[in-house]
Image: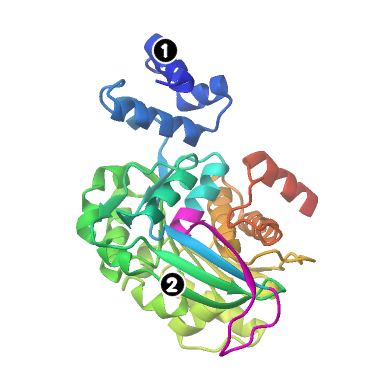
Amino acid sequence: MNEKEEIIFRSIQKNPYISQQELAEILNLSRPTVANLISGLIRKGQILGKAYILNEAKQIICIGGANVDRKFYLKEDVQLGTSNPVCSTQSAGGVARNVAENLGRLGKDAVLLTVSGLDADWDAIRQASGAYMNLDYVTAFSGVATGSYTAVLEPNGNLHVALADMEAYDHLTPAVIAKNDALLSNASAIVADLNCPKETLSYLANAAEINQAPLILVPVSSPKMQRLPGDLSQVTWLICNRDESETYLGMAIETEADWKQAVEKWLALGIQNVVVTNGKLGAMAGNNAEGILHEPAIIVDEIRDVTGAGDAFCSAVIYAWLSGSPLRETIQAGSINAAKTLMSEYTVRQDLSASQLEKDLEELK
């Protein structure tokens, strides 16, 4: 055992009912980091059984994409048919993984449930992600390539083109999810992105209803909107953008009235809470209890990178809502986290914490 593991082991030995939060305060670490250290002790056989873990606070289960993000930054305006000078970076990404990291940095116990290959790309994701989320429920398949996302970004930071290899998630079947039913039964929330197959999303909707767990769906692109479950009455939150709404609802969103009508149509399908984002125009959100409201976007003077901003928005919305915030404050939390992420060169901003988000919201007010 290393020094941190030794401290955890001795602390549990003295008090088997000590909480992860208490251990986090002793070690000056985040609670998700402590949870991962405990999982390591279980794997090593130093702690027998998982009763200690199961008695902890309920976890947020994030299901879907965990990719290697490769970003190519154009130094000049793109020229087709020839090579273009770029600089490049590589980092861990994927909607579900990004949401889990955001939530982990915010102090929530996040679990990533996904599939991967047995390759160097997954090793890189695991190394970058382990401090912020539980990775014990990832299923690896031989002969499958870990998901990857390649983005070409213009000099102003806007996305020029993106390429996504997501075939791995065809293996994220209901059978894989069913092996983790015990995990879902104790979830404080289930967050799924639309990299999951349609039948898997339908399975999750039923599981959420049975276990009385909130189900939050996060689309990843307009073409994948067809994967939404047939019965949307089991969906607690849908956080999508204008294009995705236009595709699914079969309407054009050209005016503010259209935008509001899109939210109304989503609510009419049985979803409890809906957000439709619209770039620089902000977000339109609503539920039956609080009505429909428009929250303006936070203008960013210099965009460093657009990748991850949408996931940052979703994560802060989930965090604020689970913390009991009303609708407007919930959307404001998403907006400020997205804006701060746009100003960062990282997919998940490195200064994110619960206290920092609170400070950001105070500055916004």
Q: Can the viewer see residue 124?
A: yes
Q: Residue at x 53, y 26 (%)?
A: 24
Residue 279 is left or right of residue 240, and the answer is: right
Q: Which mark is residue 276?
A: none
Please identify the quadrant where the N terminus is shown: top left
Q: Residue at x 39, y 49 (%)?
A: 123
Alpha carbons under labels 1 and 2: distance apart: 46 Å
Residue 201, percent from left and from top: 32, 64
Q: Which residues are magenta?
A: 75-98
Task: Using the image, determine if residue 328 lies above or below residue 152.
Answer: above
Q: Does dot 1 land on a helix, a strand or a loop?
A: helix
Residue 121, percent from left and from top: 40, 56
Q: Which mark is residue 10?
A: 1
Q: Are marks 1 and 2 in contact (CB under 8 Å)?
A: no
Q: Can the viewer see residue 290?
A: no
Question: Total marks drawn?
Answer: 2
Q: Does dot 2 land on a helix, a strand or a loop?
A: strand
Residue 350, percent from left and from top: 63, 47
Pick the front one: 50 or 295: 50
Give the amino acid type for the residue marked by disc 1 in the picture.
Arg
Give the amino acid type for the residue marked by disc 2 in the picture.
Ala
Pick the front one: 99 or 159: 159
The residue beneath circle 2 is: 164
Residue 318, percent from left and from top: 53, 53
First of labels 1, 2 by sequence position = 1
